[in-house]
């Protein structure tokens, strides 16, 4: 019998299973830029083995490498790690362990992509392995204390809105593709300054730091392991924590609480709030920040129109959804509008 290499169970069923399952799981992430000659074959190989370990989560494989955000049954973690390290180019790879555990993923998805992080870069002379200097938490704190240092958040606006490092520049962008171009233009004339970048787990900075070096910026640095590894180090070593608020994550949790600071506001009433949610109208599925009061008032919807749609019979709702692309959307408060989102995570 041929091994099934993709999930065929309904999403709602999988969500219910995740919520009912009390077995301990460990959420981890990792990435590696490496030359993969046959991404489709490698994808099937991973799915076959990881499915047997009970792995859930989202992984992208491309000719340029692998980017994984997954959860593993805690009692199978050692077996999983042994298997992972048996893959030559992943032997000894650093695993980023989650800061705040919870139900993160409900199914295993492994996709072949053109790139493991969508960047819009098409320069064949660019070498993604020629990265900036990697900083641990202590070195990061020391360098960002200096007046000539520019600290840049390489995440999207809806991530930095709920949590960020003190003193960081947080560009108002929807995608990493936009941010690389914006940051390069913003830094023109400041080539001699110390540039420090950070993101969730490090993968976006890996590519962005290499790109800036390629473009003539010699003093580029990046936070090794991103916010996730930084938080682990400052807690273990008793260092000053410069990150405030939540760390946005691309799974069912949506965020990890780093500090008690709430730096965002409800997108509907302006009250202090940093809880992301998706619009209860499945035809909208807008990602936005909503306080408990507005959640009750609008019944989880992003506005009155979606609230009205939710009251329609299911067949009428399906009719309204016909022909519409099934994708999540992001509320872009900075631009006072709504824009598309296509899982530009990538940490």
Image (cartoon, rainbow, N blue to C red):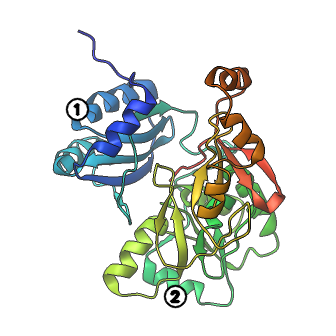
- Can you tell which of label 2 and label 1 is closer to the viewer? 1
Q: Determine the residue positioned at 40% across, 50% down.
A: 104
Q: Is residue 335 above or below residue 116?
A: below
Disc 2 crowd rating (10 Å Cα; few below 14, some 14-19, many 20+) is: few
Q: Nearer the viewer, residue 91 or 296?
A: 296
Residue 18 lies, in percent from the top left, at 34, 42
Disc 2 on helix, strand or loop?
Answer: helix
Q: Determine the residue positioned at 36% across, 80% down.
A: 235
Residue 129 lies, in percent from the top left, at 52, 54
State which quarter of the image contains the N terminus: top left
Q: Nearer the viewer, residue 117 or 239?
A: 239
Please identify the quarter of the rendering in which residue 231 is found: bottom left
Residue indicated by mark 2: 142
Q: Is residue 280 above or below residue 234?
A: above
Let me know if residue 129 appears in the view. Answer: yes
Q: Determine the residue positioned at 47% across, 49% down.
A: 251
Q: Is residue 293 above or below residue 177?
A: below
Residue indicated by mark 1: 52
- Label count reads 2
Residue 315 lies, in percent from the top left, at 64, 20
Disc 1 on helix, strand or loop?
Answer: helix
Q: Is residue 226 left or right of residue 275?
A: left
């Amino acid at each position: 019998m041929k091994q099934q290499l993709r999930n065929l169970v309904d999403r709602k069923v999988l969500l219910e299973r995740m919520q009912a399952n009390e077995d301990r799981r460990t959420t981890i992430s990792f990435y590696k830029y490496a030359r993969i000659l046959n991404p489709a074959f490698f994808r099937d190989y991973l799915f076959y083995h990881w499915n047997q370990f009970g792995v859930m989560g989202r992984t992208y494989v491309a000719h340029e490498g692998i980017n994984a955000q997954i959860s593993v049954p805690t009692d199978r973690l050692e077996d999983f790690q042994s298997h992972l390290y048996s893959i030559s180019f992943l032997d000894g790879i650093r695993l980023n362990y989650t800061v705040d555990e919870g139900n993160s993923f409900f199914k295993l998805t492994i996709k072949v992509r053109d790139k493991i992080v969508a960047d819009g870069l098409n320069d064949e002379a660019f070498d993604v392995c020629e990265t900036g200097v990697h900083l641990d938490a202590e070195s990061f704190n020391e360098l960002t204390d200096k007046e000539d240092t520019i600290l840049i958040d390489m995440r999207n606006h809806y991530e930095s809105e709920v949590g960020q490092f003190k003193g960081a520049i947080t560009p108002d962008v929807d995608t990493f593709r936009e941010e690389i171009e914006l940051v390069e233009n913003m830094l023109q004339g400041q080539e001699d300054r110390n540039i420090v970048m950070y993101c969730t787990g490090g993968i976006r900075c890996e590519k962005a730091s290499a790109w800036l070096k390629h473009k003539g910026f010699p003093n580029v640095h990046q936070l090794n392991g991103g916010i996730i590894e930084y938080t682990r180090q400052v807690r273990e070593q008793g260092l000053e924590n410069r990150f405030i608020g939540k760390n946005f994550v691309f799974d069912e949790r949506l965020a990890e609480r780093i500090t008690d600071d709430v730096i965002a506001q409800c997108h509907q009433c302006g009250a202090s709030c940093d809880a992301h949610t998706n619009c209860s109208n499945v035809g909208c599925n807008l990602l936005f920040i909503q306080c408990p009061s507005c959640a009750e008032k609008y019944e989880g919807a992003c506005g009155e129109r979606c609230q009205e749609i939710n009251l329609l019979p299911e067949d009428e709702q399906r009719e309204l959804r016909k022909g519409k692309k099934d994708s999540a959307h992001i509320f872009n408060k900075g631009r006072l509008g709504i824009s598309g989102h296509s899982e530009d995570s990538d940490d």
